[in-house]
Image (spheres, grey):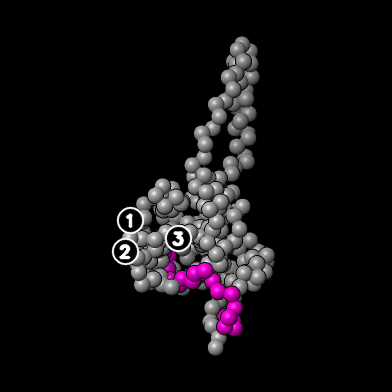
Amino acid sequence: MRVRIPISAPALLVAIVAAGSAGAIAPAGFAVPAGAQAFADELDAVSANVRDPGQPVGFRILEWSSEEVRESLVAALNPPPPEPAPELAEGRGGRGRGGRGGRGGRGGRGAEPVDPMLAALAEAPTVGYVWTGQVAGYAIRYAYRWPLPDGGERIILATNRRLGVHATAWDPVGTDYQFTLIEIRLDANGEGEGKTSLTTEVGVDEDAGTIALDDYEGATVVLESVRR
């Protein structure tokens, strides 16, 4: 007996990721012997309400993220308030040098500030991958699940790259995040839909203790026919 899945084990994923920042994904239908290391979860869907709808999308989760990673991402969205700037010295330093420093600051804007969320995702280990119709896939840096009252489940995934960053298949994009958060909601039968940060802002769900879409109910469905 042989199981037909895109990829078989973490070792192969590591080799793929090492080939590039996201990793080239093996073609769908890649056959592996039965008994190979199983995934923590496998989901398949089709794209919807995008420029190129109906494209297959696969999620292969190797393991669920640790509490340490979850807390680091929550902290990235809730950074501590900045320390107050030291008071300028009275007299000449406060009037002249302070003003010139402000003008010099404009030149300093050439370096973009680091996005705390993107930095936290870059530090997180790869726990799975997303494959689409593109040649290269996307490393999943965060995978979290939360039970729903009806027996279903919320699954929250995050990549450190934006879906469609080098293509238009996922347009329109209504946010400027350079990462992608994907929130999937499944019913008790393991079927459902998904939405993403391509069109909706990201926030912290205090009840679940995780990053999540800020307005899931009002967001556009981007993944249809999601199933295990």
Which quadrant of the rendered structure holds the C terminus? bottom left
Query: Dot 1 surroundings within 10 Å: few (below 14), some, or many (20 or more)?
Result: few
Give, as a three-letter code, the residue at label 1: Glu
The residue positioned farthest toward the bottom in the image shown? 1
Give, as a three-letter code, the residue at label 2: Asp
Q: Circle 2 is placed at which residue position?
A: 150
Q: Is residue 30 magenta?
A: yes
Q: Does label 1 or label 2 sit earlier along the sequence?
A: 2
Q: Is residue 79 visible?
A: yes
Q: Circle 1 is placed at which residue position?
A: 217
Q: Quadrant of residue 20?
A: bottom right
User: CB under 8 Å between callouts 3 and 2?
Assistant: no
Q: What is the spatial separation of the Cα atoms under label 1 and label 3, in whole angstroms?
A: 18 Å
Q: Does label 3 or label 2 sit earlier along the sequence?
A: 3
* Along the line of sight, the residue nearer the viewer: 159 or 8: 8
In front: label 1 or label 2: 2
- Main SS of residues in magenta: loop
Q: Secondary structure at mark 2?
A: loop
Instruction: Say whether residue 168 is left or right of residue 86.
Output: left
Query: Dot 2 surroundings within 10 Å: few (below 14), some, or many (20 or more)?
Result: few
Q: What is the spatial separation of the Cα atoms under label 3 and label 2, in whole angstroms?
A: 15 Å
**Residue 227 sits above or below residue 149 on the image:** below
Q: Does label 1 or label 3 sit earlier along the sequence?
A: 3
Q: What is the spatial separation of the Cα atoms under label 1 and label 2, in whole angstroms?
A: 17 Å
Name the residue located 59 percent from the left edge and 32 percent from the top edge: 106
Q: Circle 3 is placed at which residue position?
A: 145
In front: label 1 or label 3: 3
Give, as a three-letter code, the residue at label 3: Arg
Magenta part of the chain: 26-51
